Amino acid sequence: MMTPHDVTIRVMHDTDAMRAAEVLQQEVWGFEPMEVVPQHVLVTAARHGGLALGAWRDGRLLAHSFAFRGVDHDGTPVLCSHMLGVTPEARGLGLGVALKWAQRDEALAMGVTRILWTFDPLEHGNARLNTRILGGVTNRYLENVYGEMRDALNAGLPSDRLEVVWDLREDRVEQRAAAYAAGERVDLPAEQGVRLDTGTPDGQLADPDDAVTVRVSAPRDIQAIRRDDPGLAAAWRSHLRTALQTLFERGYLLTSAGVEGDHATLTLTREDARQA
């Protein structure tokens, strides 16, 4: 499978490729050696139903994803997509998106129709990729799920995460997959819905009053905020924790993410009314 920019995506099995994945993890996340998923675990998982994918150019691994088999709460067999990383030199080439669609193709070939993974709701780029671009949804908020993290991207904040449910045969996913395969963009509406907060992490949240679609604010660049104003980063964590948990309890799903002015926006849709 070829992507633009002369990058080849392929399933990874051999030990040399998995060694390259160890190095990539340190490049992307700044992991300490003890935090890296080791080569022997990657090889073993790939041999027994897991899936490791790599994006390669001229013999160099530029991006990598790794998933292992699991079971969702309702008993559905799934792939648990544990990591997806792109080296700094290759960001902006669309390799993260390409790896996710390749992961979907491989999962379906394996007979798996659901993939799960977690992401930080403060990371706008990830929110947009996982919902608006890929068509995943979530109403699963996990507080400090990994405990204290020490890597360069996560240290200093509770490791709150959203767990994405990517049902690979859902209409919204099928539409996006077909468009990607054809080299087209899905014609998605602009972010809309009732805004429930003030655009700042002040903890205020208006009553959604059962509106079909609502919006809450999020930071556009949490990494810059973490570096420059750790207190503000912590305030954003608290604000989104309260807002998302409240809305999930009220029957909303996170279905999209976009940008409005200086802030990112998370869009939630009432579960009984959502469309593609």
Image (cartoon, rainbow, N blue to C red):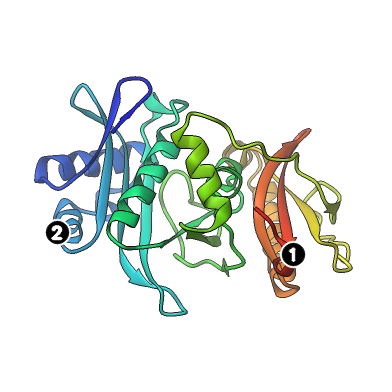
Q: Is residue 272 above or below residue 233?
A: below
Q: Furthest-bottom residue in view?
A: 74
Q: Which mark is residue 273?
A: 1
**Is the Cβ of the residue at disc 1 closer than 8 Å to that at disc 2?**
no
Q: Which three-letter amino acid code belongs to the residue tagged 1?
A: Ala
Quarter of the view holding residue 19: top left
Chain-order first, disc 1 or disc 2:
2
**Does the image show residue 233?**
yes
Question: Residue 67: x, y in percent?
Answer: 31, 56
Q: Is residue 42 above or below residue 112?
A: above
Q: Which mark is residue 47?
A: 2
Question: Alpha carbon of mark 1 to alpha carbon of mark 2: how far?
Answer: 41 Å
- Residue at left offset 60%, top offset 36%: 224
Categorize mark 1 by other alpha carbons within 10 Å: few (<14), some (14-19), many (20+).
Answer: few
**Does the image show residue 237?**
no
Along the viewing direction, whichever of 226 and 100 lies nearer the viewer:
100
Task: Quadrant for the N terminus, please.
Answer: top left
Q: Is residue 4 above or below residue 52?
A: above
- Residue at left offset 16%, top offset 40%: 17
Question: Residue 135: x, y in percent?
Answer: 56, 50
Categorize mark 2 by other alpha carbons within 10 Å: few (<14), some (14-19), many (20+).
Answer: few
Badge 1 marks a residue whose secondary structure is helix
User: Is 89 on the left-hand or right-hand side of 229?
Assistant: left
